[in-house]
Image (cartoon, helix red, strand yellow):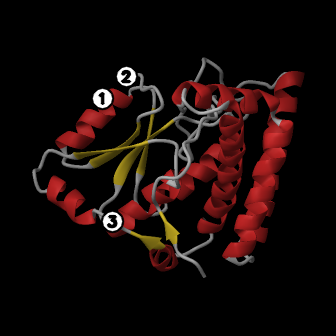
Amino acid sequence: MSRLACRAGQRAACGGARGRARSPNGNRRPAEGGRQAAAGCGRPLTARGEGIDLKHRLEYLAVVSVTAVVGLLPWGAVRGLGNVLGFAFWAVDRTHRRITYSNLVRAFPLRSERECRALCRRVFLHFGRLTLELLKFSTLTSEEMLRLVEFEGDDRARQAYSSGHGVIFLTGHFGFWELNGIVHALKIAPIGVLARALDNPYLNAMLERLRQSTGNTVIYRKGAARRIMRALSANHGVALLIDQHVHG
C-alpha cells in the first residue's frame, strides 16, 4: 500500500456548497447564505421541502454505499476510481468548470489558455481522488491512518505550542487538507477546524463525525472569531483555510 503524504497539491478553485444543518447533539448550525436545511428544522415540510429532504437522504445513502465499497478496495483502485469520478464531474458540471477556469486565469495570468484548461481538468481529477480517499480513510483505525501519513515540521508545531498562546495553522483548499487535519490530532494535538456547514445535513453530520473522530472540534462560521480567540487563549491549535471568509 502506498503512503499518503499530506502535502500541498493542486490548488482547488471550485466553490463549496452552503447551507444550514443540525449537529449530532441537536444544536442548529450557522446559516450559510441565510438558508436552512429542510430536514430536522422542527416545522412541517412543504412539498418542495419534502423533495429536498428526499434528495438529501438519497445523496447520503449513495455516499454511505460508496464508502462501503471503497473500504474494501486497495488504494490504487480507489485513486483510479477517484480520477474517473473527477473526470465525470469535469465533463458535466459546466458551472464549476467555468468558475475553476476563471479563477485559474486570474491566479496564473502568464499561463496560456491551454495550460489553464489542462490545470482545470487536473483540479477536478484531484478532487475526485480526494473525495474517495477521504471516504476510505473514514473506514480506517487511528493506527492505520498514522501508518499511511508522513509528517514534516511537527517539531516546529510543538515548539509553537510551548509558548502557551495557542497556535494558528494556515492552509487552503489544496492537497489533502482534510486528511491533514484528521491525523494532526493523532500525531501532535487535537485542533479546532474552521468549517462551513454543507447543504445536506446528513452528509454534514457524517463529515463532522469524521473530522472529530480523532479528537478535533469543528468551528462553524457564525461566531467563529470569538471561538477562535477562546481556543487560542486556552493554548489550543486552530486550523484556518485562508481561501474562505470568516464571519464573527
Query: From what the image shows, is residue 114 above or below residue 164?
Result: above
Q: Nearer the viewer, residue 233 or 134?
A: 134
Q: Is residue 227 above or below residue 102?
A: below
Marking on residue 226: 1
As helix, strand or loop, the secondary structure at mark 2 comes to loop
216 horizontally vs 108: left or right:
left
Instruction: Give the camera-side residue of 40 and 97.
Output: 97
Q: What type is the residue that disc 2 sits on?
A: Gly
- Residue at the limit of the structure toward the bottom, as seen here: 1
Q: Which residue is mark 2?
A: 248
Expressed as whole percent of the image width and height from the top left, the position of residue 12 reads 58, 41
Label 3: which residue?
152
Q: CA distance from mark 1 to mark 2?
A: 7 Å
Left or right for 32, reference 180: right
Q: Quadrant of residue 198?
A: top right
Q: Is residue 54 visible?
A: no
Q: Position of residue 228 (x, y in %)?
A: 30, 36
Residue 104 tag number? none
Q: Amino acid at mark 1?
A: Arg
The image position of residue 126, as x and y in percent, is 65, 52
Residues at marks 1 and 3 touching, judged by CB atoms closer than 8 Å? no
- Answer with mark 1 or mark 2, whichever residue precedes in sequence: 1
Dot 1 and dot 2 residues touching (CB under 8 Å): yes
Q: Residue at x 37, y 22 (%)?
A: 248
Q: Amino acid at mark 3?
A: Glu
Q: Residue at x 39, y 26 (%)?
A: 223
Report how far apart the C-alphas of labels 1 and 3 lie in the structure. Answer: 30 Å
Res 90 → quadrant: top right
Q: Position of residue 16 (x, y in %)?
A: 62, 33
**Mark 2 neighbour class, 10 Å CA radius: few under 14, some 14 to 19, many 20 or more:** few
Circle 3 Cα neighbour tier, 10 Å, few/some/many (<14 / 14–19 / ≥20): few
Q: Residue at x 74, y 59 (%)?
A: 82
